[in-house]
Image (cartoon, rainbow, N blue to C red):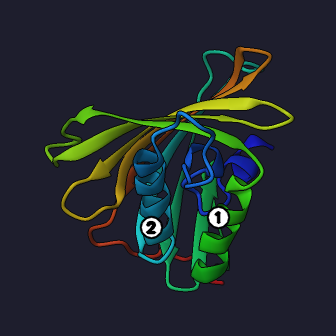
């Protein structure tokens, strides 16, 4: 199943995170800004609305949601909510570690509003031994948290999966009727 794999670490997908270990020529400040936004997000309540499009099922996007509150992660896939334990410190550390395994090129593109909120728009390209990704990340200038993210996961230059995420930090609540 695509969703759980894409919705991991810390759901601000690791492939989109930049880090100071970026290759020569990458904008280290841009990579650091994206990584810091992911680390910060790992520790705050967030509601994510996710659309996943797969080359295996063209024209049939999958909609899902995630809610993170304290030590619980709620995931909704195919209309069904589940809950599992969540560790913010481990999630942030996992993101840092994942970045050591890939090459990154990060660039601050421009200032741009997302749903009326001022944001900085970053482009991140990542390469690993098994594939690559192109990501766009919009980070709030007010909070330093990601507001929107788009990731294209590539295999031999062809988009295999496209993931679009919108992040909401206001009035985050657990889904009704779901317990851990």
> Residue reaching furthest front?
24
Mark 2: secondary structure: helix
The residue at 50%/85% (across/down) is 70
The residue at 67%/78% (across/down) is 90
Q: Earlier in the sequence, mark 2 or mark 1?
A: 2
Quadrant assignment, res 100: bottom right
Residue 77 is labelled as none
Where does label 2 land, which residue? Answer: 41
Q: Nearer the viewer, mark 2 or mark 1?
A: 1
Mark 2 near mark 1, Cβ–Cβ under 8 Å?
no
Say if 70 sits above or below 155 in the image.
Answer: below
Residue 26 location (% of width, % of height): 52, 37
Q: Would you say 131 lies left or right of 113 here?
A: right
Depth order, front residue of 62/21: 21
Quadrant assignment, res 113: top left
The residue at 46%/56% (across/down) is 32
Say if 124 sits above or below 119 in the image.
Answer: above
Depth order, front residue of 151/144: 144
Mark 1: secondary structure: helix
Where does label 1 land, which residue? Answer: 96
Residue 106 location (% of width, % of height): 49, 38
Say if 2 sits above or below 48 in the image.
Answer: above
Circle 2 packing at 10 Å, graded few (<14), some (14-19), many (20+), is: many
> Residue reaching furthest right?
129
Residue 177 location (% of width, % of height): 54, 77
Q: Looking at the rendering, in which quadrant would you find the N terminus?
A: top right
The residue at 43%/70% (across/down) is 40
Depth order, front residue of 84/100: 100
Residue 167 location (% of width, % of height): 38, 54
Mark 2 to mark 1 CA distance (whole Å): 13 Å
Q: Looking at the rendering, in which quadrant would you find the C terminus?
A: bottom right
């Amino acid at each position: 199943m695509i969703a759980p794999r894409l919705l991991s670490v810390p759901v601000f997908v690791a492939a989109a995170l930049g880090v100071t270990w970026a290759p020569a020529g990458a904008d280290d400040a841009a990579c650091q800004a994206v990584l810091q936004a992911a680390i910060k997000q790992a520790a705050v309540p967030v509601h994510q609305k996710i659309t996943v499009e797969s080359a295996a099922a063209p024209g049939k996007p999958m909609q899902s949601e995630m809610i993170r509150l304290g030590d619980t992660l709620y995931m909704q896939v195919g209309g069904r909510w589940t809950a599992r334990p969540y560790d913010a410190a481990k999630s942030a550390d996992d993101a840092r570690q994942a970045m050591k395994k890939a090459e990154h090129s990060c660039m601050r593109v421009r200032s741009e509003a997302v749903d009326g909120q001022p944001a900085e728009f970053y482009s991140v390209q990542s390469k690993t031994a098994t594939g690559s990704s192109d990501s766009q990340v919009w980070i709030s200038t007010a909070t330093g948290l990601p507001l929107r993210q788009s990731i294209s996961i590539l295999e031999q230059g062809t988009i295999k999966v496209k993931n679009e995420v919108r992040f909401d930090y206001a009035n985050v609540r657990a889904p009704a009727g779901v317990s851990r």
